[in-house]
Amino acid sequence: MGKTIAFDESSLFYFILPPIIFSAGYSLKHRSFFSHFSYIVTFGLFGTLISMAAVSFLVISANHWLFAAPEYANFRLSDYECLMLSAILCASDTVAALTLVKPNAILFGEGIINDAVSILLFRSIEDLVASSKSSVINAPDPLKGGAVEHGLRQLDADRFGLVSSDALRILGSFGFVSLLSVLVGVGFGLAASFAFKHIPTLKVHAAREVFLIMLVAYLAYVVAELVHLSGIMTIFCCGMTMSYYTIYNLSHRSRKGSQLAIETIGSAAEA
């Protein structure tokens, strides 16, 4: 009997994606990126939100129209499930964006931000569903189980239908997580720059310098994921900060070696 091989998403998010995003941030052309920053934010952030709204409307409408008959009720998706599907559909392929359009700063930046925004939207919706389940399961039970059972039956019947306040909760969670993710990435990058500037022993071995740079970036990614932030946005901002500040506090050999090593690892992860 053959064994079924299941794809483990943790392999992608913890071993393949971080080198790609960090390489993109570390090798970023700052002048070109920030000179087009308004266009990048417009297409990457607001464009993704508009795409998310349009796709969500179409998916939810099609879901209710196609499965309106009672005999198809078991096949109907909840509104939250439709939103999760829409968040996936409005995301672009980061690897393809980096591989094909890296020379174009606008398309390159839009691809990175689009992917981070899509993942943040998906996780915000997922957290909202989890909190809705928890609020019902942990509800007070003055009638020895009757209230909780009724709540669970009602929750299953409604299948987490959307209410008007959910959109504001999703956007609020998205904005909060985005801001914290950027701050964590910049903070780790500045901390690395400070350490390399004031600790001369770190510059003795070039190989160790390069290793520490990658270690700090990966640590920033893991910390962001552990506290339910966007690891992609964190490691991208960390790499961008390091390439702007930390690289000038490295030894001459490490400046060239770090760029070559990080780009090589990023290219290997893309392959």
Image (cartoon, rainbow, N blue to C red):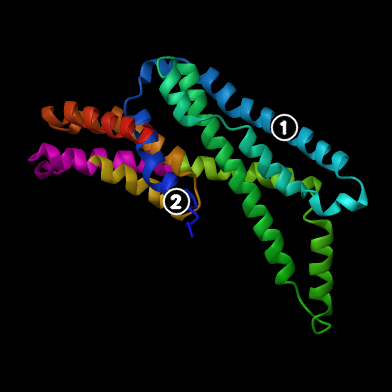
Instruction: Please identify the quarter of the rendering in which residue 66 is found.
Output: top right
Looking at this rendering, what residue extends furthest in the right direction? 69
Q: Which residue is mark 1?
A: 55
- Bounds of the magenta segment: 183-212
Query: Residue 107's x, y, as percent?
Result: 50, 19
- Say which element carries label 1: helix
Count residues near mark 1 (Cα–Cα under 10 Å), then give few for <14, some for 14-19, many for 20+. Answer: some
Say which residue appears at 70% left-offset and 42% top-offset. 83
**Image quadrant where one finds the C terminus:** top left
Task: Name the residue type under label 2.
Answer: Ser
Q: Which residue is mark 2?
A: 10
Q: Count the numbered circles shown.
A: 2
Q: Is residue 223 above or below residue 144?
A: above
Q: Earlier in the sequence, mark 2 or mark 1?
A: 2
Say which residue appears at 13% left-offset and 39% top-offset. 207
Count residues near mark 2 (Cα–Cα under 10 Å), then give few for <14, some for 14-19, many for 20+. Answer: few
Of 179 and 216, nearer the camera is 216
Say which residue appears at 84% left-offset and 72% top-offset. 150
With 227 as the anchor, is 54 left or right in this view? Answer: right
Q: Is most of the magenta stretch helix, strand or loop?
A: helix
